Amino acid sequence: MKHDENERAGLPDRPPSVAAEIFGNRLPIAEHFAHLLADTGVSHGLIGPRETPRLWERHLLNCGIVESVLPHRTRLIDVGSGAGLPGLVLAIARPDLDVVLVEPMLRRTTWLDNAVKELDLLNVQVVRGKAQDFWGKLRAPVVTARAVARLGELAGWCLPLLEAEGRLLALKGETAARELAEDESAVRRAGGISGRLVLVGEDVLPEPTRVVEVRIGGQPVRPTESATSRAVKGPRSSAQRPGGGRRSARRGSTKRSSHES
């Protein structure tokens, strides 16, 4: 079978040809990161051992393609960064980005710090804590999250981290459209003024990345009472598996929800 040799060796497959298009001359750094994930990422419990043969398709390309919908030289906060997905991958693909990785677990922030140093990434900062810990302390035009929580709850945590007219980009799985419709009211209560599903990479990836984009208005969002209450009690576990502007025009096709303003 295709993956047998690499799976026995605990190594990821070689990058597919599309990886060069996404990462450009930074592909060697992306390959280095893939091997870190397959090595200490597995031993530290950030990535399951069965994920190593499909690191590129399921994780690195799924995250890296999102760079095509990000503007030049923007600041980005990645909430619940875990193994650096998508924040660290985006920082590799786009050295012009200023990326802050927010992660509450010490074991994971230690790993992320070591990975950033080993990859010699000068555009990444790792901070330990929940999103709620940084309300009023950190703000950015873009907040990203992958496999963290349902959209309504995620919006309550993340929208207060956005600058005015900012957007939350939540990487979701196959049920993204349904979740967007079901959580519309919760997203609006949290301060979102519009939501839409964007399919990124349809023309280059076997499976496009599903991104739910939630925008806020011309004023920063204040945390809602319910989000503040959950911050005190701690989040529920509801993680989901997921399925800028350099190439956005031809990579990202948009499917608008009927609930979008």
Image (spheres, rainbow, N blue to C red):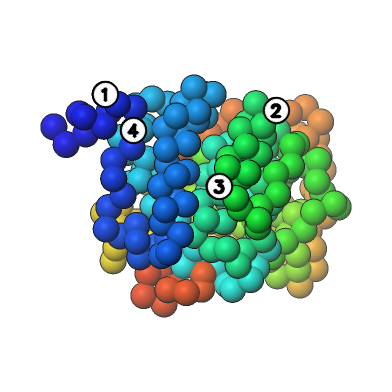
User: The disc labelled 1 sits on which kind of residue?
Assistant: Arg
Asked which secondary structure carries label 4, the reply is: loop
Of the pair 94 and 79, the residue shown nearer to us: 94
Callout 3: SS: helix
Question: Mark 3 is on which residue type?
Answer: Leu
Q: Is residue 185 above or below residue 194?
A: above
Which of the 4 quarters of the picture holds residue 215?
A: bottom right
Q: Name which residue type carries label 4.
A: Leu
Q: Is residue 44 visible?
A: yes
Disc nearer the start of the sequence (3/1)? 1
Sequence-first disc among 2 and 3? 2
Q: Which mark identifies residue 106?
A: 2
- Left or right placement of residue 32 versus residue 135 in this view: left
Residue that badge 3 annotates: 119
User: Callout 1: 10 Å neighbours few (<14), some, many (20+)?
Assistant: few
Residue ID for mark 1: 8
Q: Give the distance between the C-alpha atoms of the residues marked 1 and 2, in whole angstroms.
A: 30 Å
- The answer to whether marks 4 and 3 mark residues whose Cβ atoms lie closer than 8 Å is no
Spatial CA span between label 4 and label 3? 18 Å
- Distance from the alpha carbon under mark 2 to that under mark 3: 20 Å
Q: Which residue shows up at 34% across the image and 61% down it?
A: 20
- Can you give x and y, in whole percent of width and height, for residue 213 in the image? 55, 60
Residue 201 lies, in percent from the top left, at: 36, 62
